[in-house]
Image (cartoon, rainbow, N blue to C red):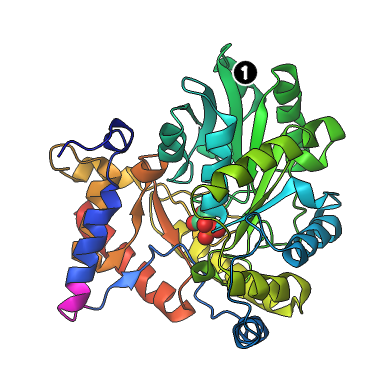
Amino acid sequence: MQLARRIRQIPPSATLALNAKANALKAQGVDVVNFGVGEPDFDTPDHIKQAAVAALESGFTRYTPVGGIPELKEAIIQRFEEDLGLSYRPAEIMVSCGGKHALYNLFQVLFDPGDEVVVPAPYWVSYPPMLMLAEAVPVIIPTREENGFKLTPEELRERLTPRTKGLILNSPSNPTGMVYSRPELEALAEVVLAHDLVVISDDIYNRIIFDGLEFVNLAMLAPELKARTFVLNGVSKTYAMTGWRIGYAAGPEAAIAAAVNLQSQSTSNPTSIAQKASVAALRGPQDFVARMVGEFAWRRDDIYQRLLAIPGVTTPKPEGAFYIFPNFSAYYDRLKPAPGQSRSQALAEYLLEEARVAAVPGAEFGEDACIRLSYATSRERIATGLARIREALEKLGK
Ligand SMILES: Cc1ncc(COP(=O)(O)O)c(C=O)c1O
């Protein structure tokens, strides 16, 4: 059977093979340190779970409004107002089955076949395939490590064409952990306005930010920017709720209505009881978030120091999220990638075999010089894993 063209054009993830290998090793009883995970290693707080139980017991188990229950939309609006000073009306909010789903819906309603959408690299793995599913053209712009892997206005301007319609920004970034400052965004805003671009601001990690740094997105800078920006967020990362599948988008009403319409013909509403749990997450005590972020900040300092102590390794210091994206290219000359394999894949495979450490090759994020390490794992595992990486690299050097 011939599958549809739209799915045939999406390449399978190269990490799948690596994951399978890591799982096979684990199944054989090998102790693998896993730096590959993309979710907090914390449990969902109790009061949030209890809200879901209460919803279940009260029979809140039927279809809800497609774009989210009014109570959840109000809780989202309140957080936008309190956290970011952004005002939205309920018609400007869509709740979806995870942030990923909200993004998918938005791409489908915003972009026509052939529309170019700028994706600064390193990027979150799902942006290019999701854009391709909308038949849009991802225009990958490489950024530079010395600029903290952040897009500059010059780099953006150079790649604009009459077909450029959108720009995706993700801060704090997955995979680099870098955060755009207000002046950096103001500089990009000039280009966005001059070229009439639609912006998708993926803020999914905006509450996981370190050193008291200010979080800013483009919508916060000026009303004319808010009018062209879609802000994406969700409860997955902030409240350790990845499995609950609740994400949301805020933006201009007509596009949000279209995205809800699309959702009405695909998934319908996100799970009823997960919506109730999300109300408790957004409205309830926020001390869990501070504790989790404090722990991530400690680990960030620790893993950063350990990486810098390895000869030849460089990395900007992450300012948020729970990833670090070190450059290991100093060791690449000593590797022999298999045919079709990128050098970061070859290194990730070597680290798995030699160091029993699982990590994601930078090629997956559009930057082959690096490897992504997630520090959503215990302090003790970080120490063990980094000692193993160091030893394996020393061996490679001999
Ligand atoms: C940058 C980024 N955006 C969006 C998401 C989507 O998260 P979810 O669908 O769990 O809300 C993720 C999850 O890994 C992410 O890393």
Please report the residue visible at 59 percent of the width from the left and 66 percent of the height from the top.
63
Instruction: Residue 59: give x, y in percent of width and height.
Output: 62, 82
Direction from residue 182 to residue 210 in the image, left or right? left
Residue 142, image x and y in percent? 48, 30
Q: Is residue 222 above or below residue 278?
A: above
The picture quadrant where one finds residue 52 is bottom right
In the rendered view, would you say 379 is above or below 104? Answer: below
| The N terminus: image quadrant | top left
**Residue drawn at (65%, 75%), measured in percent from left and top?**
277
Q: Locate residue 159: give its quadrant.
A: top right
Left or right of residue 93: residue 272:
left
Image coords of residue 103 (percent x, y): 55, 45
Q: Which residue is mark 1?
A: 157
User: On the rendered image, what quadrant is the C terminus found in?
Assistant: bottom left
Number of numbered markers: 1
Task: Tell whether position 27 is magenta.
Answer: yes
Crowd band around label 1 with a 10 angstrom C-alpha radius: few (<14), some (14–19), many (20+): some
Horizontal side, residue 30 vs residue 166: left or right: left
Residue 43 visible, this angle: yes
- Nearer-the-camera pick, 49 or 23: 49
**SS label for mark 1:** helix
The residue positioned farthest toward the top in the image shown:
162
Front-lying residue, 191 or 44: 44
Residue 11 is covered by the magenta coloring: no
- Residue type highlighted by circle 1: Arg
Highlighted range, magenta = 25-30
- Residue at 57 percent of width and 62 percent of height: 270
Which residue is painted at 77% across and 53% down in the image? 214
